[in-house]
Every structure is written in structure tokens, then in C-alpha cells.
Image (spheres, rainbow, N blue to C red):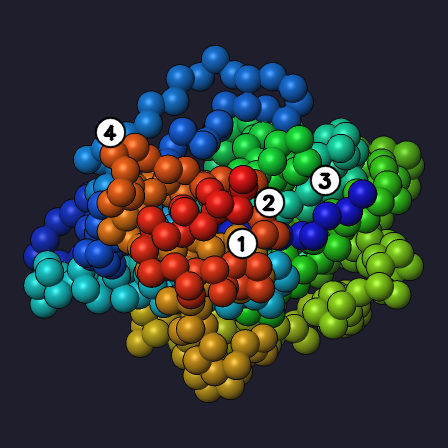
Amino acid sequence: MPVPKVMGVETEYGISVKGAVDRDPVTASTLVVNSYRDRERNKVLWDYDQESPTSDARGFTTDETVQNPDEESNRVINDILINGGRYYVDHAHPEYCTPECLDARELVKYDKAGEIILNISRQISEDVLGKDTRIIIHKNNSDHKGHSYGCHENYLMDRSVDFQEIVDGLTPFLVTRQIFTGSGKVGYENGSDPAVYQISQRADFFESEVGLSTMVDRPIINTRDEPHADEKRFRRLHVIVGDANMSEFTTYLKVGTTALVLTLIEMGVIKDRFKLMNPVKAIKSVSRDLNCNGRISLLKGGDWTPIQIQREYLNLAVKYLSSTADPIAKDILEKWEFVLDKLEEDPMQLDRHIDWVIKKRLIEAYMRRFNLDWSDHRVLMLDLQYHDVDPEKGLYYRLAKNGQVERILNPGEAFSAVTDPPESTRAYFRGMCLKKYSQQIHSVSWNSMVFELNSSSSLNKIYMQDPCRGTKELVGEILDGCKTADELIKFFDELSK
């Protein structure tokens, strides 16, 4: 049975330091994250006990040992945000995780808030290091030196759906959706076939169909079984194939269409009807097919274009979901059809909408102006500059400022998402508690909060096992009426009697 598609995105940002002070990426990432930290929340820990990265959705646990950071390191690398999200150091990258959102438009807003947070962090860090040092942060997925970093999506699903049905129903969609979700990339990496320009930044790095890892032998379908919710009712589907997007329109369509397809899978209407002969080969070939009309072999016979496969998913969504769709879902369906129609006519018609097309048009104009070819190093720099989170340097922001890209959000709307949590999920409870009771919060995870009370020497944990609860409607008045965490815990204790 379909459940509400609560969703979120985790983005690892690329980082480099230029100037008088030489910093490695880990040190630079730590500086950037710590520069943003509110001193009032400085002591709040991230609760790693609630994580299980070695659990596999296929029913087993790997033998890999996971070493959680000690308390001091925990505080250094984590910042739990008052908007309900998380900001932390992940290996050599600053990573921003949006709070849980209930629809695609809300997610776009909180994804864009992440860019603002990273840029504020960059500015503060540069002030610390001095005027001769510049920190460059890119919202992209490749350093063009063979290293890829992720933009992972998360979707709430019904636990009762067989995981193989998810694999069969979702894989063809993910392989082909890049025609409207790709960020575009100059060149190729990871020993893949040559290309001067690709649709996707991530496609070169996928080497298997299904698996648990996100770092090596990357799978199209990730099997991490870490629900961050009631594991008997819910599954958190961890999608790792997507590109990090600058275009609001692209992000909106990416998460919106995926949520609709997952609902269709929960309804049992897709099964394996679009199963591909070779998904790993297909994801790379689609990325190199700038006309989007190359053929992909299906296991049950026939060769289809990615547009044809996407249109079949769209037709199913219209058939089964349009009559009950809310306004945002209806808008997603309309934009999905619009994009497929334009891709079929001429992909370059989407040079205001889709990242890979916007970037391609921008680069080609620059190449014509200066008589360059794709191998020129300035073309590669242009690719990177498109993703720069500094509004004064980033080429996407320049286009947006000049009204040359389609927007989903109203001007300035993302700024409110920097400090205010979504009102429609449990992120509201988390964010508001951090605003009101930060001095009494010991640790936080996605599905729990641990409080240190003035009236007790023991820790008190509140579980949030349903992502659709803890909303403003359900807890807003309660939080308004409790001045301290002691009062809040007392209220819930009395409620449970």
C-alpha cells in the first residue's frame, strides 16, 4: 500500500583551497562546517547508535566493521541544523542533508537552502584564513580526476513491498531519467568510453546493478537497509545514481517523478515490464546520447529509446495517479510530459530548464566566441564554474539573476528554509526543539532526540518513528506551551499514562 513520499537529499560538495594557506580537503571541510556552527548548539551530538550502514535490504548484514567517531570528533564534524537538516564532514567533503520534506517543491526549497549555507560557511572560512586565500565549493559530482562524490536521494516506502519488485520496477526508470536530470559533464572518467560531453556526471562511475556499497563497485540500486523510522512499517530507499543539480526545475522533476514511480511500484503496476538487458551498459550509453534517441535492449524483447521508456512510466502515472493527485503531483505530470515532448523534438529547446542542456548551450556559446574546441582547458573550467556556490562566481547564478533559467521557487524563498524547518514532517519537531532547547539536547538522529533535563541526572529519549508525525499541526501548540525541555518531557510522560 502506498505511503506518503517523504523525501530528502544528501549532497557532498566538492571543495578546494587556493592561495597563501594550503589546506587538504578534510581540513578544509572541517573548517567550513565548523565556521557555520551556532555556539548554542555546539555541544549537541549526532546519535550514531541509530545508524546501521551494514544492513542489506536483501536480508543480511555484512561483516564490515563501522567505527563511529568519539565524542570530541563527533562535535567537530557534525552540525545539526535548526531547519531540521544535518551538516557534517563526510570523508573529504562537506555534506548537507536536507530535512525530511513532504513534496518535491518543498525539497527544492531546502536543497537550495543548502547552497546558501555552504556559501555562508565559505565566506566565514575565508575571513578566518585571510584575504589571500579563496575557498571554492562546487555543487557537482566529479573533480574530473577520476573521483566521484554523491548526491543521494531518500524516499519513504511501504516496507511490505518486495525489494526485488523495487529493483525490477525502478532500474529502467533510473537508467533513463538522466535525460532530464543530468547535470552535464565535459569529458569522461573511470576508464569509460570516450566522450567530449555527457548528460550525466555520475554515469561513468556505476559498475553493478545492485549492491550495498556507495564508494566502490557502485550499484544502480543501493541496498542499504537503514530506515530511520519504524522498520516494520517503512523502508528508506537510498537512491545514489542522481547528479547534484543547480537548476530548480531539474531537481523538482527529478524527485517528483521518482516519487510517483515509487508509488506505482507500491501499487504493483510496474513489476518487470521494462527490465533492461544490460542496465550498467545502458546507463553509460544514455549519458553519451545527446539526442536521446539511442536504442536500449529490453530483456523481454525490443529496443526502446530512453524517451519511450520514460513515456511509458508517465502514461502509467497518468492512468493510475492523476485522478487523486494533489496540485504538485499534477504539475509534475504536466512538466514530465512537456520535457519528454521537447527532448523528442530537440533537446536544446530545454536550455532554460534542464542542467545538462543549460550548461551545454553556455559552453558552446563560449567556445564559438573564443574559437575553442572541447579539449581546451577553459571549457573544463567553465563546466566547474557552473556549479560554484558563490553567487558572484557561479555561472548558474549569473543565468538565474538575468532571468535565463526557469525557476520553481519565488525570489528569496530559499532563505527562510535556512532557519525554519518544514512544517509537514517530523523535521518540524526536531528543528523547533533545537531552536528552543539546544542547551538541554544531548544528541539527535533522524528518528530520535535525547534530552538532558535539569530535573534529572538520566538522559531522556523521544523516538520519532513516523516521519509524517511531529508536524506543526500536531506539536506546534505543545512546543509553544513548554518553555523548557523538562516541561516537554513531563507533558509526554503524562500523555503516555
The mark found on residue 466 in the picture is 2
Instruction: Kindly state the secondary structure of the residue where label 4 is placed.
Output: loop
- Residue 329 visible, this angle: yes
Label 3 – label 4 distance at C-alpha: 34 Å
- Of pointers 3 and 4, the one earlier in the residue sequence: 4
Nearer to us of marks 1 and 3 is 1
| Other-residue count near label 2 (Cα within 10 Å), few / some / many at <14 / 14–19 / ≥20 | some
Q: Residue at x 76, y 33 (%)?
A: 160
The residue pinned by badge 4 equals: 70
Packing grade of label 3 (10 A; few <14, some 14-19, many >=20) is many
Residue 385 percent location from the top left of the image: 37, 65
Q: 10 Å neighbourhood of mark 4: few (<14), some, or many (≥20)?
A: few
Dot placed on the residue nearer the N-terminal end, 1 or 3: 3
What type is the residue that disc 1 sits on? Gly
Mark 3 residue type? Asp
Question: Which residue shows up at 70% across the image and 69% down it?
Answer: 328
The residue shown at (39%, 59%) is 482
Q: Secondary structure at mark 1?
A: loop
Task: Check disc 2 and give the amino acid type.
Answer: Asp
- Tag 1 and tag 4, C-beta contact below 8 Å: no
Q: CA distance from mark 2 to mark 3?
A: 12 Å
Question: Looking at the image, is mark 2 or mark 3 nearer the viewer?
Answer: 2
Please give the residue where the numbered disc 1 appears in the rendered image. 470
> What residue does disc 3 label?
158
Query: Which one is earlier in the sequence, the residue at label 2 or at label 3?
Result: 3
Quadrant of the snapshot with the N terminus: top right
Q: Is residue 340 left or right of residue 360?
A: right
Give me the C-alpha separation between circle 1 and circle 3.
19 Å
Q: Earlier in the sequence, mark 2 or mark 4?
A: 4
Q: Are marks 1 and 2 in contact (CB under 8 Å)?
A: yes
Mark 2 or 4: the one toward you? 2
Q: Measuring from the top left, give residue 350's x and y in whole percent.
A: 65, 73
